[in-house]
Image (tube, rainbow, N blue to C red):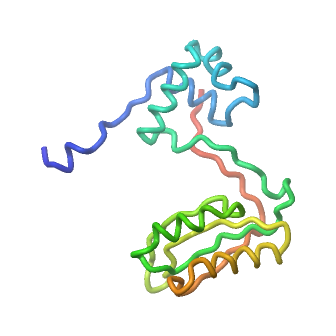
Amino acid sequence: MSTSDSRRKPVYHPNEYDRMIILATQSGLPLTEKPYQDIAKQVGLTEGEVMARMERMQEHGVIRRIAAVPNHYALGYTHNGMTVWDVTDEKISQLGKAISEFDFVSHCYHRPRHLPLWPYNLFAMVHGKTKDDADQQIALIKQTLGDDCRGHEVLFSKRILKKTGIRLKS
């Protein structure tokens, strides 16, 4: 076994309890005071066992993340744009962290360039109630990136697409 193979995580195989947890949560966590307890009752485990199994599945990439997914339009944020930035590779971690701290940025991440057509490597989703709000936010990001920014584009949302992950059949 090579050195790189020894560092690789073993493949995770969800068992029947894991499958039941995935089925119980794939449309979202119950909107209750104790969602993990409710799931535990449904699948026949304790709340702690459900949480431990979900954590283990997350560590192995079976579950990518557990997070609230707000409907920005329903909250009045109708000018939502994915900003894409061409920044210096040497500073992308530092710059990405700075941009992700803005309260109007819901997510910010590094993506590979696809030259020569796509020079952008830093993505940040902004949310404004008006076009002017969004434009001011974009200007603030540009100012923050300073001389490390070599160009950018903004891809504004035109409609909402339903986001879902993989769905298991019961």
Query: In screen coordinates, is 122 left or right of 68?
Result: left
Residue found at x 59% / y 40%: 66
| Relative depth, front residue between 153 and 137 | 137
Query: In screen coordinates, is 51 left or right of 33?
Result: left
* Vertical order, 89 against 35 (above or below): below
- Spot occupied by residue 73 in the image (x, y as percentages of width and height): 82, 58
- Spot occupied by residue 53 in the image (x, y as percentages of width and height): 48, 26
Residue found at x 68% / y 77%: 140
Query: In screen coordinates, is 29 left or right of 86?
Result: right
Residue found at x 68% / y 75%: 155
Quadrant that contains the N terminus: top left
Residue found at x 68% / y 32%: 29
Quadrant that contains the C terminus: top right
Determine the image quadrant of residue 139: bottom right
- Spot occupied by residue 90 in the image (x, y as percentages of width and height): 39, 75
- Spot occupied by residue 9 in the image (x, y as percentages of width and height): 31, 40
